Image: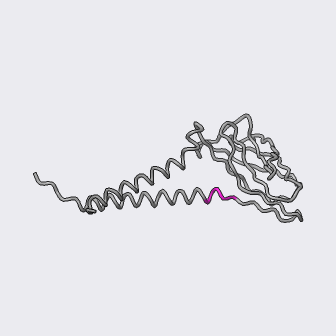
Amino acid sequence: MAPKSHDRIARLTATLATVITLLICVSAPASAGGWAVGSLDAVPAPSAGETVEIGFTILQHGVTPADLADDVGIEIIGTDGMVSYFAAEQDDTVGHYTASVTFPTTAGEYEWNIRMGWFGPQELGSLNIAPDNDSTTITTAWPTVRWIMVALIVALGAVAVSSLAMSRRNTPAVSS
């Protein structure tokens, strides 16, 4: 295979990989007609059955505070599919909400989400409540996945730019 066609294939592969990665990253929010990011305030380690005030902020497109009237709150989902919903009230700051959440009394693993009105829910990860009610752990994997996707996009972009630079260097000059 000639070096020129090899460069074209490498460039095409890098470009396609970048486009596919970008489509995967943005397809869900784009299909919803808009997107928002919910972020929790500091959350204390709750005990089983304990009621805790949880504050969170919703930013449309990650920037503008979202003023939502309906279906805003925290939901906890058990392994049996049972959903407990705790409605949130917006406080004096636009986009900031507070919900009074009572954590399950039964030990086990739960999932929890922020409901963000018409934007839909945002997963917060797993909530593991230990039988002794002393050690509740909260894990969130989603932020890690986001950073991995950003790193992958940057790496693929670097490969595409490098391939383009190499192909231009190997192109013979056109004489007039």
Give the farthest residue toward the top. Answer: 69
Q: Which residue lies at the image location 30% right of the left edge and 62% below the top edge? A: 166
According to the image, what is the colour scheme of the structure?
A: one colour
Q: Nearer the viewer, residue 23 or 146?
A: 23
The percent coordinates of residue 49 (x first, y second) are 89, 54
Position of 151 compared to 129: left or right?
left
Nearest the viewer among 101 and 9 is 9
Magenta span of residues:
140-144
Q: Residue at the location (88% across, 63% down)?
A: 131
Residue 116: x %, y % from top left: 69, 41
> What is the quadrant of residue 147 in the picture?
bottom right
**Horizontal and vertical percent position of residue 14:** 40, 56
143 within the magenta span: yes
Report the number of numbered marks: 0
Q: Is residue 116 above or below residue 166?
A: above
* 16 within the magenta span: no
Does residue 14 appear left or right of residue 58 in this picture? Answer: left
Residue 62 at what x, y percent from top left?
Answer: 59, 46
For the stretch drawn in magenta, the main secondary structure is helix
User: Furthest residue to the left?
Assistant: 176
Q: Is residue 14 above or below residue 82?
A: below
Q: Which quarter of the rendered picture does the N terminus lie within?
A: bottom left
